[in-house]
Image (cartoon, rainbow, N blue to C red):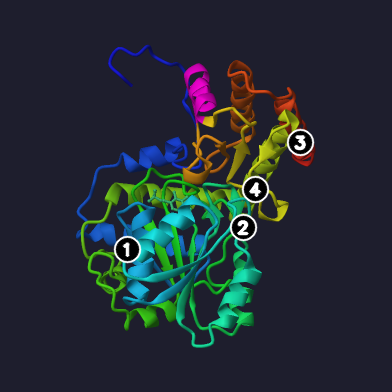
């Protein structure tokens, strides 16, 4: 983008696990003129996106939309439900879980962190054991990251719910779905989640700038007694205004146009088809990684993420050096390794508005980049991915013929 940089033809490959490429339809929707957020037309848009998001979260209760990144919605979840000194049980799935824990401590909450090696999902049995030990019910909430974007491990929220129920513990269940919502199956009501946190720039295919809380009736009731200071994040004023589709302050009008379009696109494709598409692209990616002879950071297939794959570099090779070669040679951005796994892994995002050829193109960029960067590997990753994608398309081709 620098003034004198030579023009690079074609589309940039944004293969990080968020922000994801924004489809043209959404970009056009966002380009509409900004309207009066207190005028007669806005309420209809507001109501449409609030109802639409309920269908994405699969909830009949409340959805709150903030003009903020996902981090804001994390804070909202904690600040609305908890009081200073409250204990919460959190699970160290990776970098994002660690950031959420650090935030909780800064807000004056006392997190207990179940440790992990960043190569697996949340251990429901460990959660159940911690809750059974908590006879006095000191834990007010269990907080889990659904898809740990730093590692490519997806936790089983249904199993976490069962663990809480088996321990007969009244703690709220709060789940970060910032990188999973609208990419991996998620059911706020069915799984008895009390607060779901989400963001706009990953599966929802929007630019960054919106975030969400889905709030159960139980969480809303608990929030009445919560004593952490809050004003901007307060659910009360939001939910009161939202009943007519309006907001207590200026909402991000143009991003809401984009959200309206995104929700429509997701339903046009069908959520189940969206999830199946992500599953296929993830499996194609893993087949490529295995063919290259490289390791997948997530070590248990039960927790494989359909959103991203973190690839472990061979000993002595720097993932960021490889990423730099690939960006320079092929104009493709891959995700960097975060904190504990910095330079040791790179992450291939395969979420959002992607199709088979996007994935094949991305994997081709990685395979060529491994060669250019002198990273020891075997050829054949792209071929393995193509074989899988073609094989799993056979039924579709027969239908079209
Ligand atoms: C991206 C992400 C976040 C951070 O969201 P921001 O929009 O950057 O504030 C938190 N948790 C998870 C799981 C994420 O993927």
> Is the residue marked by circle 2 packed among few (<14), some (14-19), or many (20+) residues within 10 Å?
many
Question: Which-is-in-front pick, marks 4 and 3?
Answer: 4
Relative to 198, 295 lies left or right = right
Q: Which residue is mark 1?
A: 106
Q: Specify which label sits upstream in the sequence, 2 or 3.
A: 2
Q: Which residue is mark 4?
A: 298
Q: Which residues are magenta?
A: 320-333
Q: Is residue 270 visible?
A: no
Q: CA distance from mark 1 to mark 2?
A: 25 Å
Question: Which-is-in-front pick, marks 2 and 3?
Answer: 2
Q: Is residue 87 above or below residue 305?
A: below
Q: Is residue 38 above or below residue 133?
A: above
Q: Which residue is mark 3?
A: 388
Q: CA distance from mark 2 to mark 3?
A: 26 Å
Could you say which is closer to the camera, residue 383 or residue 337? 337
Residue at the image point whose x is 57% and y is 61% from the top: 186
Q: Which residue is mark 2?
A: 121
């Amino acid at each position: 983008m620098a003034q004198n940089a030579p023009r690079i033809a074609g589309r940039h490959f944004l293969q990080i696990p968020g922000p994801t490429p924004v489809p043209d339809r959404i970009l056009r929707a966002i380009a509409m003129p900004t309207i009066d957020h207190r005028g007669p037309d806005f309420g209809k848009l507001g109501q449409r996106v609030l109802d639409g998001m309920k269908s994405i979260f699969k909830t009949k209760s409340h959805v709150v939309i903030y003009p903020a990144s996902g981090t804001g919605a994390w804070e909202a979840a904690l600040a609305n439900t908890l009081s200073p000194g409250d204990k919460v049980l959190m699970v160290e799935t990776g970098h994002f879980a660690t950031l959420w824990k650090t935030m909780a401590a800064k807000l004056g909450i006392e997190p207990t962190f179940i440790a992990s090696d960043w190569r697996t999902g949340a251990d429901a049995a460990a959660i159940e054991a911690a809750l059974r030990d908590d006879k006095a019910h000191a834990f007010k909430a269990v907080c889990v990251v659904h898809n740990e974007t730093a590692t490519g491990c997806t936790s089983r929220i249904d199993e976490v719910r069962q663990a809480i129920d088996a321990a007969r513990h009244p703690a709220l269940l709060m789940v970060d779905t910032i990188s999973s919502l609208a990419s991996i199956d998620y059911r706020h009501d069915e799984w008895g989640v009390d607060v779901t946190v989400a963001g706009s720039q990953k599966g929802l295919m929007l630019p960054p700038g919106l975030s969400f809380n889905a709030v159960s009736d139980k969480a809303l009731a608990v929030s009445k007694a919560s004593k952490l200071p809050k004003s901007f994040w307060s659910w009360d004023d939001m939910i009161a205004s939202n009943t007519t589709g309006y907001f207590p302050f200026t909402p991000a009008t143009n991003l809401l146009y984009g959200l309206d379009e995104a929700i429509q696109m997701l339903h046009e494709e069908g959520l189940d088809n969206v999830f199946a598409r992500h599953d296929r692209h993830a499996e194609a990616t893993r087949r490529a990684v295995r063919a290259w002879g490289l390791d997948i950071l997530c070590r248990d297939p039960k927790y494989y993420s359909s959103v991203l794959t973190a690839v472990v570099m061979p000993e002595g090779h720097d993932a960021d050096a490889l990423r730099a070669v690939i960006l320079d040679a092929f104009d493709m951005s891959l995700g960097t390794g975060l904190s504990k796994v910095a330079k040791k892994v790179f992450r291939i995002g395969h979420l959002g508005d992607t199709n088979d050829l996007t994935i094949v193109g991305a994997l081709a960029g990685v395979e060529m980049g491994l060669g250019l960067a002198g990273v020891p590997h075997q050829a054949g990753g792209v071929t393995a991915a193509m074989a899988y994608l073609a094989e799993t398309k056979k039924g579709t081709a027969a239908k079209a013929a």
